Amino acid sequence: MRGGRTTAMLEIELKARVEYPELVEGMLGAVLAYAGEVDKRDEYWSVPLVDPSIPSSGFRLRIRTEPGRTTVTFKEKTYDGLIEVNHEVEFGILDPGAFKLFLGKMSGKLVYGKSKKGKMWKGEGGILAELVSVENLGLFLEVETLCEDSKNVDLDSIKARLMQIVEQCGLDESDLEPLPYSQLLGMSGY
């Protein structure tokens, strides 16, 4: 995603802690197609809201840097049990430094950063699975799908498919991590 293109999506995801990465990697390779390496560096920013009557810690956004691209994402995060369901908007930026200066002009502050590296696999129906090491937190399997039309989404079916992949990797519901990375890192939510 480069330049001026904006995408609004419904993201449905879950993550599980992984104790035996070689086993999970082998199982992922049996059910999904390998799609390459993951190297994501995220910065989470907060910009104060103008309306003081709205109780909030500010408007939060993420700047994600990956090899060859930088994207900005903001989300309305909700949970359906252990499954994260996010309405998100994402757009590419060509000059991250200029964008950060822009945030600073709006009194934006860097809240925290996160780094994750690993491998990814893709499957039918837009399924994406990543086996990643999250700096200072350990190993996780993240399984997600993105949907363009949130009105016609069968959440129960998608949740079942995501959980099926987790189970095919030798994990179960007890391995799911319900907390967002921000809380695991000791930061207030994103």
Image (tube, rainbow, N blue to C red):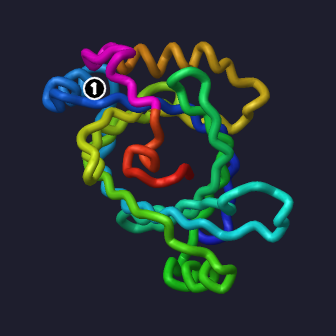
Q: Residue at x 42, y 65 (%)?
A: 65
Judge the density around disc 1: few (<14), some (14-19), many (≥20) Cα neighbours within 10 Å.
Answer: many
Classify residue 22 by image quadrant: top left
172 in relation to 120, above or below: above
Give the residues drawn in magenta, as a range: 167-178
Magenta stretch encompasses residue 168: yes
- Foreground: 170 or 47? 47
Would you name the residue on which mark 1 appears? Answer: 28
Can residue 184 be seen in this snapshot? yes
* Quadrant in which residue 121 is drawn: top left
Question: Is residue 33 covered in magenta?
Answer: no
Q: On the picture, is 103 further left or further right than 71?
A: right
Q: What is the total number of numbered labels drawn onto the structure image?
A: 1
- Above or below: residue 91 compared with residue 80: below
Q: Is residue 151 or residue 171 the one in the foreground?
A: 171
* Quadrant containing the N terminus in the rendered view: bottom right
Q: What element carries label 1?
A: helix
User: Residue 91, percent across and down?
Assistant: 62, 62
Q: Residue at x 59, y 14 (%)?
A: 157
Q: Where is residue 95 in the image (x, y as percent from the top left)?
A: 53, 80
Q: Can residue 9 be seen in this view?
A: no
Q: Which amino acid does label 1 sit on?
A: Leu
Answer left or right for 158 relative to 43: right
Report the side of 183 relative to 47 (left or right): left
Residue at left offset 18%, top offset 28%: 19
Left or right of 46, for residue 52 = right
Indicate whether 108 appears above or below 35. Answer: below
Residue 124, placed above or below residue 55: above
Residue at 52 percent across and 52 percent down: it is 188
